[in-house]
Image (cartoon, rainbow, N blue to C red):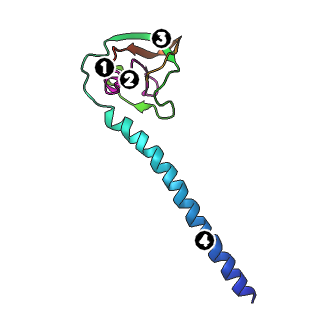
Amino acid sequence: MNSSILAFALLAFMVISQSNARLIRQDFADDDFDQDLFEQKRDAPTNNRCTNIVKGQDSNGGDINAAYPANVVSAAACAALCELFPTCDHWTFNVNNGKCWVKDKPSQMQTNSAVYTGSCTKSK
């Protein structure tokens, strides 16, 4: 009798665990989709829509997707990434960690020697 109860409890635990694992995987899959979108665009060539670059100014806020900054190799690559988003009108690249934030909402400028910030004309 005790072994039957134990077996039933173990089976119920396994079913619940698998259901929760599926839900967690789905959440990660949604997050991965956003991350993949940024990763695909990180090495894109520039079309000269983003030509104004300033060193030492951090454009804080206004990110298109603050949770997933892209990892790029340079400020130029960050500018090229911004050019791929029609609504992107400015961007910030951190030289210390290679993070690139593309932006489409107003943001506040702050001094930071580790970043480059650039502005872009909007796509037509």
For this rendering, which residue is in front, 6 or 22? 22
Mark 1 and mark 2 in contact (Cβ < 8 Å)? Answer: yes
Disc assigned to residue 123: 1
Disc 1 element: loop
Mark 3 and mark 1 in contact (Cβ < 8 Å)? Answer: no
Sooner in the amino-acid sequence: mark 2 or mark 4:
4
Q: CA distance from mark 1 to mark 3?
A: 24 Å
Magenta residue span? 78-102
Disc assigned to residue 71: none
Q: CA distance from mark 3 to mark 4?
A: 53 Å
Count the marks: how many?
4
Report the residue marked by disc 2. 87
Residue under the point 41% across and 32% down: 70
Mark 4 and mark 2 in contact (Cβ < 8 Å)? Answer: no
Sooner in the amino-acid sequence: mark 1 or mark 3:
3
Residue flagged by tag 3: what amino acid is it?
A: Gln
The C terminus sits in image quarter: top left
Q: CA distance from mark 2 to mark 1?
A: 7 Å
Q: CA distance from mark 2 to mark 4?
A: 46 Å
Residue flagged by tag 1: what amino acid is it?
A: Ser
**Front label number (3 vs 2):** 2
> Local crowd at mark 4 within 10 Å, few (<14), some, or many (≥20)?
few
Residue under the point 53% across and 21% down: 61
Report the residue marked by disc 4. 14
Q: CA distance from mark 3 to mark 2?
A: 21 Å
Whether residue 54 is situated above or below residue 46 in the rendered picture: above
**Front label number (2 vs 4):** 2
Disc 3 element: strand
